[in-house]
Amino acid sequence: MLELNTTRQPGGPPPPLPAPTPPGTEQQAEGAGILLQISMLVLAFVLGHVLRRHKIYYLPEASASLLIGLIVGGLANISNKETSIRGWFNFHEEFFFLFLLPPIIFQSGFSLAPKPFFSNFGAIITFALLGTLIASIVTGVLVYLGGLTYLMYRLPLGESLMFGALISATDPVTVLSIFQELGTDMNLYALVFGESVLNDAVAISLYRTMASVRSNDSSGQNLLLVILSFLETFVGSLSSGVGVGFISALLFKYAGLNVENLHNLESCLFVLFPYFSYMLAEGLGLSGIVSILFTGIVMKRYTFSNLSEKSQHFASAFFHLLSSLAEAFVFIYMGFDIAMEQQSWSHIGFIFFSILFIGVARATNVFSCAYLVNLVRPANRQIPMQHQKALWYSGLRGAMAFALALQAVHDLPDGHGQTIFTATTAIVVLTQACVWKKVVLEVAIAANICTACLFGLPPTENKSSQNNLLWSSTFCFQGAFDWRLNRHNA
């Protein structure tokens, strides 16, 4: 009877219109969403400050932000506001690639220490280019073979290689924060940092190349042509970024902008050049990430010195601020979307074996490339085994792999993208949170950092002997916590 009353009969009155939304309700909901986002950001920064102040390195800031997003997303899932909250917190990969990622990548290139970076440039390029290619292919082939032998969910070869490309994007931000706080060998820091920032750009280029090959139905295409296509994109993007960087250097050198009354114009132009580089490369069908990375490197080395002193202080502070905000947003969004997004947990075997395969691929990448680098390096500049282990342990997965996996949901049909997304989600959470304590200890030992320093022990207890470096994790945790408890009770 209800249907008959709401259906318009011939000659009868029209059905009633839905009740209009009260004025101001939509703006109120938008304001509430923005307020919630700002509150989560404030909480993330305050929690990060507390963690640093108390030297609690086994819970890094990125993991804390991820945890905040997970908690808020979980609460939204069990509330009746899920639909409205989801509209404000969905992790859109377009927003990530256009607005969040560029300042992070530019700051990475802009903050590189020139001397250790360029003195290890050959090794960094080897790890980032050849190593990422090796890791991507090894992971993809192992996943494909695992499907053929019924060990795990089966993916076609092209989609397996896409998964290998996206999961090869590492995110050692938390490891680098430990290095910065405690101090470590500058060559090791340059290797980890340089390989990571170039690795992200290479992984994106590889993923897009594999996706293009798959969409063109060219699975039988010569592998050499695929590699040449990737190198063409990478070299073109690199050239675009370097070119924009040198143009900015020439402009600021000869345009006479570093006078007293032109600081505002000078700063505005300096801020605009990185985004110009990014959008130029994207418009040319190249990789904006590679372009803006090398723009940052060139602008720091050649453009920055042509700025006035006030503009130098502003530019450094501004890009550091943008990068910090973007990183916090990324991990909060990741945590929220992991809790809100529909997951495909029916293929646990795929997740388990993927974790094993990326460990094998990372080891193949690091140790084979280190062997090649050591062949051409003199004896006093060899990469020691301790540093190789630190590079292996530093291969955590983070925001880049997550964003590419979210894009794979739209790129791949038949639930394959959803399976890849769920596996990537599990890998990101596992590496960023669950096994972090073990990773920190292993990296510290591999990097010859005193493990007692990780827990804020006083200098008298920071022994530098090899016995101290080889503490077991259980003894180290127990001793550190007992010492903190005794200090608190005193």
Image: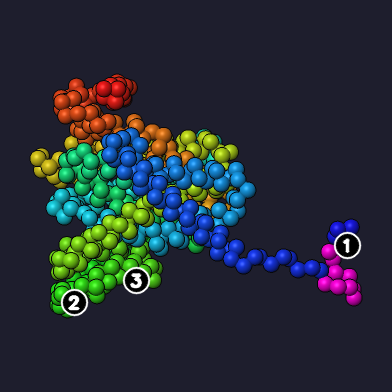
User: What residue is at 30 percent from the left and 64 percent from the top?
Assistant: 291
Residue type marked 1? Leu
Q: Amino acid at mark 2?
A: Asn
Q: Are marks 3 and 1 in contact (CB under 8 Å)?
A: no
Identify the mark nearer the N-term, 3 or 1: 1
Q: Quadrant of residue 284?
A: bottom left
Does residue 488 sit above or below 174 in this rendering? above
Q: Are marks 2 and 1 in contact (CB under 8 Å)?
A: no
257 relative to 467, above or below: below
Say what secondary structure mark 3 lies in: helix
How is the rendered protein coloured?
rainbow
Number of the front mark, 2 or 1 = 2
Q: Could you classify mark 3 by the number of other residues whose Cα lies within 10 Å: few (under 14), some (14-19), or many (20 or more)? A: many
Distance (Cα) linking label 2 and label 1: 75 Å
Q: Report the span colored magenta.
A: 5-14
Q: Nearer the viewer, mark 2 or mark 3?
A: 2
Please, what is the dominant secondary structure of the magenta stretch? loop
Dot label at residue 99:
none
The quadrant where residue 363 appears = top left
Question: Residue 321, image x and y in percent?
Answer: 30, 57
Residue placed under numbered mark 2 in the picture: 261
Q: Secondary structure at mark 2?
A: helix
Which residue is identified by label 3?
280
- Residue 418 lies, in percent from the top left, at 55, 48
Q: Secondary structure at mark 1?
A: helix
The residue where tag 1 is placed is: 4
At 20% from the left edge and 33% from the top edge, which residue is drawn?
Answer: 449
Marked residue nearer the N-terminal end (2 or 1): 1
Please provide percent x and percent y for residue 289.
34, 60
